[in-house]
């Protein structure tokens, strides 16, 4: 057989041991699977050049109605969705992204429920019309109100997990149940479904309450493997000393993040801080306070935590890879 054909048919080589070392320094463009306008070759090259070790990618997200996006299910001619008619293009792209990132030494956090896709927290009722959770032939109705949270995972979610989990390689990669997900019971139920499919799956949580007591509340290291804290109130060094009295009132031992990171029983390698929510501006160039954010990152990294930076590239339409803050990110390694 022609050696060229063998090369084209071969999958990139992956070293699982390299992907399982924590802590990690990450950078994310969350729509890499959903949005095929991103040039995967270019993104992987940039990520390798600047030393990205971790990235967070959405499995489900808000922009379903864009006809150029990939999605795991099919839109019918009448505009309705068939949520059980899987679209192979999505899963081919998913596999390619996973293999390319993992071969580059980059561990993936797969975010499942992207809350803003269907709850009242982001999209208006009008904006949600025509989305899969409103207009489908399968009887699925994720209400705009957060009452849906109390009955997830529904029958469709369970079918979705059965389909998608085998593609994700959830050890070394990580399954994040939801982005800023409030309901504790959903985490427990989804965890049980996912682990029934892959018993050794690594599972991470991200609550809408980014407070230090959540490490204990969610029993990190026992019930879940990792926890992510987002940056709305965690983007400067001083934020680590901000008190959260509710933590003490809930009989949780840490009231500041500084106390959390210094606590003897806390495994800091299980903590991932994120700049998601840490923007100081809607300016697509000067999106963050770069100096203060760098100080914060270096402090928590010095404590043994991971950090995942949400690239400003998500502020402009893809392909926009020149917007990746390459020089700044490289400076984080110093």
Image (spheres, helix red, strand yellow):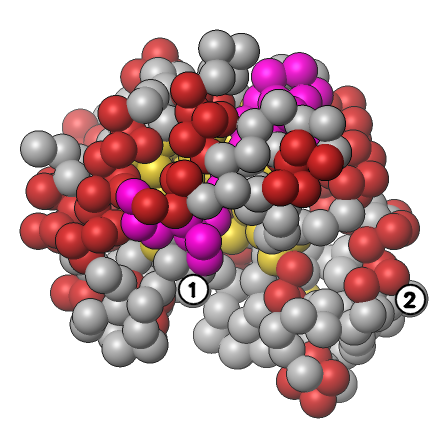
Main secondary-structure element of the magenta-colored stretch: loop
Residue shown at the point (30%, 17%) measured from the top left:
18
Q: Is residue 217 magenta?
A: yes
Work out whether residue 65 or residue 10 is closer to the camera in this orientation and state it.
65
Q: Which residues are magenta?
A: 215-237
Image quarter in which the C terminus is found: top left
Q: Which mark is residue 35?
A: 1
The residue tagged 2 is: 139
Residue shown at the point (31%, 73%) measured from the top left:
281
Q: Does residue 102 appear anywhere in the picture?
A: no
Image spot of residue 271 (x, y percent): 46, 29
Q: Which mark is residue 186?
A: none
Image spot of residue 232 (x, y percent): 45, 57
Crowding near the residue tagged with mark 2, few <14, some 14–19, many ≥20 C-alpha atoms within 10 Å = few
Label 1, secondary structure: give it: loop
Crowding near the residue tagged with mark 1, few <14, some 14–19, many ≥20 C-alpha atoms within 10 Å = many
* Residue 130 located left or right of residue 205: right
In this view, 224 is above or below 115: above
Please identify the quarter of the rendering in which residue 324 is found: bottom left
Q: Does residue 200 appear anywhere in the picture?
A: yes
Residue shown at the point (61%, 73%) measured from the top left:
122
Residue shown at the point (77%, 47%) measured from the top left:
183
Image spot of residue 77 (x, y percent): 71, 82
In this view, 154 is above or below 76: above
* Residue 81 located left or right of residue 114: right
Q: CA distance from mark 1 to mark 2?
A: 27 Å
Label 2, secondary structure: give it: loop
């Amino acid at each position: 057989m022609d050696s060229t054909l063998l090369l084209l048919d071969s999958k990139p080589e992956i070293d699982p041991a390299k992907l399982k070392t924590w802590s990690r320094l990450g950078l994310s463009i969350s729509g890499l699977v959903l949005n095929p306008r991103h040039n995967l070759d270019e993104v992987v090259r940039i990520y390798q050049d600047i030393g990205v070790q971790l990235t967070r990618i959405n499995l489900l997200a808000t922009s379903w109605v864009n006809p150029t996006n990939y999605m795991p299910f099919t839109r019918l001619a009448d505009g309705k969705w068939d949520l059980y008619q899987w679209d192979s293009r999505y899963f081919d792209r998913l596999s390619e992204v996973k293999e390319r990132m993992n071969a580059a030494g980059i561990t993936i956090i797969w975010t499942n429920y992207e809350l803003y896709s269907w709850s009242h927290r982001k999209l208006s009722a009008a904006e949600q019309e025509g989305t899969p959770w409103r207009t489908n032939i399968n009887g699925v109705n994720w209400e705009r109100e957060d009452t849906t949270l109390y009955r997830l995972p529904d029958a469709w979610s369970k079918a979705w997990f059965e389909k998608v989990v085998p593609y994700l390689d959830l050890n070394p990669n990580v399954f994040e149940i939801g982005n800023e997900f409030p309901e504790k019971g959903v985490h427990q139920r989804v965890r049980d479904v996912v682990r029934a499919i892959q018993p050794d799956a690594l599972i991470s949580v991200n609550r809408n309450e980014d407070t230090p007591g959540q490490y204990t509340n969610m029993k990190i290291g026992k019930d879940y493997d990792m926890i992510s804290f987002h940056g709305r109130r965690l983007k400067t060094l001083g934020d680590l000393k901000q008190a959260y009295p509710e933590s003490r009132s809930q009989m949780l031992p840490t009231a500041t993040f500084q106390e959390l990171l210094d606590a003897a029983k806390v495994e800091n390698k299980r903590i991932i801080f994120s700049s998601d929510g840490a923007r100081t501006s809607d300016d697509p160039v000067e999106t963050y306070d770069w100096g203060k954010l760098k100080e914060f990152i270096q402090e928590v990294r010095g404590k043994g935590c991971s950090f995942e930076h949400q690239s400003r590239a998500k502020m402009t339409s893809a392909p926009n890879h020149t917007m990746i803050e390459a020089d700044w990110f490289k400076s984080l390694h110093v």
